[in-house]
Amino acid sequence: MTGDLLEGLAAPAMEPLAEGAVVLRGFARAEAPALLAAVAAVTAAAPLRHLITPGGLRMSVAMTNCGEAGWVSDRRGYRYDPRDPDTGRLWPAMPSVFRALAGRAAEAAGYAALAPTACLVNRYRPGARLSLHQDRDELDLDAPIVSVSLGLPATFLFGGLARSDRPRRVRLEHGDVAVWGGPSRLAFHGIDPLKDGEHPLAGRCRWNLTFRKAR
Ligand code: MD6
Ligand code: FE
């Protein structure tokens, strides 16, 4: 068999990030068109918005949610809310293509199949960034988070359990899926300002979907 054929058949490369954290390279690439179509349906029902942090800053990343609960931020703090605070309506249901992918990715990374209750949808335009943070607003911190990257590549900063730990820099590309839990669940992480570019499926933007067991 040629190298090309073997590559085509091989399981996606699993790249360890830290204890409990891996990147599944290209895991979602084949499904990307279906995922992006589902993203368009979600954003049509619950429009993207730039949330305000408790400190009063407008986030450069635009966000929305689907599932039973959505992550929101305002002057009062961060929380999961079953309703979109902009409209008072429930968040759109989690598309089945999202749910299935999250379950398979968690298993491929060695975790029990994840039954996500929440999916945070992040949209980065060139220049948008996410400063170092921990994800600790979820009720179930034992469940891993599955994170799907689509569109333009980004530099992911993956630090330690203290904000001052110097983060590793990892490039995340279209179709890559990161899964992390266990000892890494509360690691500090962020995204460098997005470099400009043009992606054949996503145009001048990067999408990130993070699946959580929020409540
Ligand atoms: C992003 N991701 O990739 C931002 N959080 O755009 C996150 O903040 C994140 O990738 C928790 C777990 C995985 C993540
Ligand atoms: Fe996060």
Image (cartoon, grey):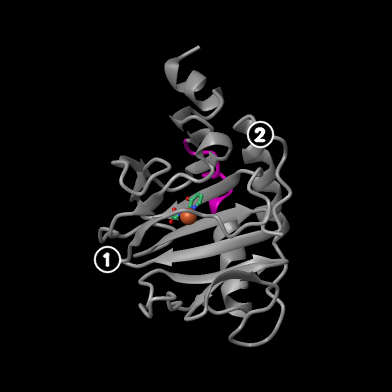
Q: Residue furthest top?
A: 1
Is residue 37 visible in the rendered image? The answer is: no
Dot 2: element: loop
Q: Residue furthest bottom?
A: 87
Side of 61 where 68 appears, left or right: right
Instruction: Please name whichever residue, 214 or 206, is drawn nearer the observer in this view of the structure.
Output: 214
Ligand 1 has an atom within 8 Å of the beta carbon of the residue at disc 1 = no
What percent of the width, then of the height, locates residue 25?
47, 36
The magenta segment is: 25-33
What percent of the width, then of the height, locates residue 24?
51, 35
The secondary structure that most of the magenta stretch takes on is: loop
Residue corresponding to mark 1: 127
Q: Is residue 182 above or below residue 136?
A: above
Q: Is residue 111 above or below residue 192?
A: above
Q: Is residue 145 above or below residue 18?
A: below
What percent of the width, then of the height, locates residue 49?
48, 78
Total count of labels: 2
Distance from label 1 to label 2 (Cα)?
A: 34 Å
Instruction: Please name whichever residue, 10 or 3, is drawn nearer the observer in this view of the structure.
Output: 10
Residue at 51% across, 44% down: 29
Residue at 34% across, 67% down: 125
Is residue 26 visible in the rendered image? The answer is: yes
Q: Quadrant of residue 107?
A: top right
The kind of residue tagged 1 is Gly
Side of 40 where 163 appears, left or right: left
Instruction: Please name whichever residue, 54 or 181, is drawn nearer the observer in this view of the structure.
Output: 54
Residue at 72% across, 68% down: 93
Residue corresponding to mark 2: 111
The kind of residue tagged 2 is Tyr
Mark closer to the observer (1, 2): 2
Mark before the other along the chain sequence, 1 or 2: 2
Is residue 96 located in the magenta-colored stretch of the structure? no
